[in-house]
Image (spheres, helix red, strand yellow):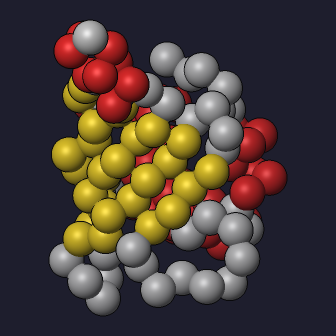
Amino acid sequence: MSDRLNFSDIERNATPQSIERGREYYEWGQVQSIVRRGSLLQASVMGQSEPWYETFLDVERCEGDCSCPYDWGGWCKHIVALALTYLNDSEQIENRFSLDELIERLI
C-alpha cells in the first residue's frame, strides 16, 4: 500500500532508539483508529505518560507529527509505529476522502 514511504525513510527520519521502541509499539498493537485522507495518516497511539497521542504521517512527503513531548530530533516512537503499521498492516487503515476530494464532489 506504500505510495512513497518505505523502511529506509523510517531509518532516515528516526533514531535507532525510536525505531526499536516504535517497533515494540507496532508489535503490541498500540496504534489504533487509523484514518487515511489522501496521503495523510492520522492515528491514536497509546503512550506511557498520556493514554493516547494523536499522531500524523504524510506518506508522500515522509513528514510526521505527534502530540507527545518527544523533542530529541526526528520521528518519535509513535510516528515510527504508525509508519510500520502502514507498511505492514494496511488493512487496519480506514480510507476516507481527502478535503480536495470532498470539495470536488460538491462542485
Q: Nearer the viewer, residue 16 or 92?
A: 92
The residue sitting at 33% across, 31% down in the picture is 99
Task: Examine the rendered structure and indicate whether residue 52 appears above or below residue 35.
Answer: below
The residue sitting at 21% across, 15% down in the picture is 106
Please give left or right for residue 55 compared with residue 32 in the image: right
Q: Is residue 89 visible?
A: no
Task: Examine the rendered structure and indicate whether residue 36 appears above or below residue 31.
Answer: above
Relative image position of residue 88 (x, y in whole percent): 46, 29
Q: Nearer the viewer, residue 61 or 8?
A: 61
Dividing the picture into quadrants, the one containing residue 4 is top right
Seen as rendered, the residue at the extreme front is 107
Dividing the picture into quadrants, the one containing residue 5 is top right
The residue sitting at 44% across, 53% down in the picture is 56
Report the quarter where the C terminus lies.
top left
Please give left or right for residue 69 compared with residue 2 in the image: left
Relative image position of residue 35 (x, y in whole percent): 28, 37
Please give left or right for residue 39 compared with residue 11 in the image: left
Please give left or right for residue 57 compared with residue 72 in the image: left
Relative image position of residue 102 (x, y in whole percent): 26, 22
Q: Is residue 50 visible?
A: yes
Relative image position of residue 37 (x, y in whole percent): 36, 31
The residue sitting at 45% across, 38% down in the picture is 40
Figure label count: 0
